[in-house]
Amino acid sequence: MLAIIQCDQEFEATLWKHRDFVDRSLEYVLAKPKRLWKGRKVGLLAIESKGVKKIEFMCECISGAGVGDFDRRVIVRRITPIAPVSLHEIVKLLGRGFDSLVQHDGQLGKKESMAFIEVLLELHPKLRATYEELSRSDDPLVLDTPRRELLAWERDAVGVVFDMAGFDRGVLAEWRVDRSVRPVPFLEGIPQRPRSEERLVEHDAARFLDWSASGSTREAWRVFESNEQTLFVTNVGGEGLENGLGMDLIYYHENRDSFVFVQYKKMKRSDGDWCYYPDSDSNVDDELARMRRVDESCDEVKEGGFRLSVAPSYIKLCQARGEMAQGAELIQGMYLARSQFEELRSSDAILGPRGGVRFGYRTVPQYLSNTMFCDLVRGGFIGSRGKGSEFLRRCVQEILEYGHSVTLGVLVGDNLRQAQRTSRRKSRRAGPVL
């Protein structure tokens, strides 16, 4: 898939300044319409000179986080200078339907990309090697150690937080770390906010930083904004991973005074299915007891908005595929309410072929997917009510003391009505690609 970028004067000046770089370390960030920019593409950078537009560089384009209601960050990287190619000449050979490429930029559809690259490489066959190299994404991170596995869970939890809050999780695609060093919290690889916004970030974060204060050597936090709402996210803890302990996700909606709690568990491939065996998990009984106490405490509160369920505790059984998910994808799996998990575990409904309790797609009769779960949380249909931030603070501290890593997300700002949330999601999806 291809994308055309018409370079403005500022971008063009930056490109010419680095015309002779060989390590391709330059990265440039552009703001582009969300409806026209998604995923990862090979980019062709067009520069106009004396009324003629020529493709002077090829690159990789990665669609990142949203910027306001209608734009998103597009990261331009692996920029490679090439022998100039006339954009007008290629468009003329392609014929009708491609005229707009001379004036406007954007992503090409699959058929248009194939037609464009066929003409380009026929005219300039020496560009094939560069195109094929840029077409290959970075090799996915292999999850061959407990800490790398934790990194993948933290990444997923950050993405789930974004979905629950109604934020664009394209920020996941912006993650960059030096893979040769010891794995750090996932958020450490997400770009910092501009320095002009530091005061706002510190003001919003100050109320929540002490929730996760634990003296941990693994801690990172970021603050994001969208639609007059602020989302605070932190990864902290995880020193206990080598002992088989896991990760918890806590999401708190301040305006609703509501939180949900997700315990991550790993499913492995077995007998052609993805399976989790609780009898082989020495920690699950203590973790269920802790979640049960939280659910029972929340069940005592009768005030607050309507909920389908006020019990905040859920378990996400994740497919352990051995590699970090790419782009903005979430880990596939199933969400089960804590009470549902315990009910199934104590029944004969999910026994495997050898008589053991087995949670898998072939045995669990019903579960929530990523989309279903996040939609219910975002709409306020599930989650606690009326327990207050002090109760949540104690929950975070208890989890950290237990040895787990915690990904904490806190959404601050006025509620959006369901019609507003739906309208904003549609505005992100609408519009044709070139």
Image: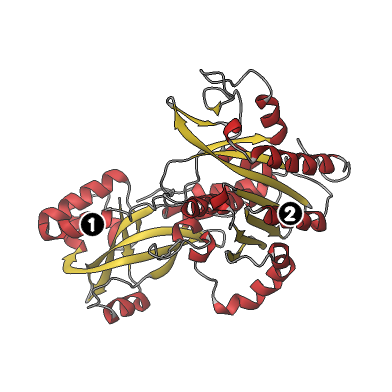
Q: Is residue 304 left or right of residue 424?
A: right
Place of residue 280 in the rendered image (x, y in percent of width and height, measured from the top left): 57, 33
Residue drawn at (75%, 53%) of the image: 395
282 or 392: which is nearer to us?
A: 282
Q: From where the camera sits, is residue 315 visible?
A: yes
First along the sequence among labels 1 and 2: 1
Vertical position of residue 283 compared to residue 106: above or below: above
Q: CA distance from mark 1 to mark 2?
A: 48 Å
Place of residue 215 in the rendered image (x, y in percent of width and height, measured from the top left): 66, 67
Residue drawn at (53%, 37%) of the image: 333
Q: Which amino acid does the dot numbered 1 rest on?
A: Glu
Place of residue 91 in the rendered image (x, y in percent of width and height, measured from the top left): 21, 56
Place of residue 88 in the rendered image (x, y in percent of width and height, measured from the top left): 20, 62
14 or 103: which is nearer to us?
A: 14
Q: Residues within 10 Å of mark 1 (few under 14, many from 20)?
A: few
231 or 353: which is nearer to us?
A: 353
Residue drawn at (72%, 32%) of the image: 339
Numbered label attached to residue 398: 2
Tell me where residue 125 sits by quadrant.
Answer: bottom left
Describe the colour scheme in one phrase. secondary structure
In the picture of the structure, the residue carrying the numbered disc 1 is 133
Residue drawn at (61%, 52%) of the image: 161
Q: Which amino acid does the dot numbered 2 rest on?
A: Glu
Q: Secondary structure at mark 2?
A: helix
Vertical position of residue 276 compared to residue 247: above or below: above
**1 or 2: mark nearer the eye:** 2
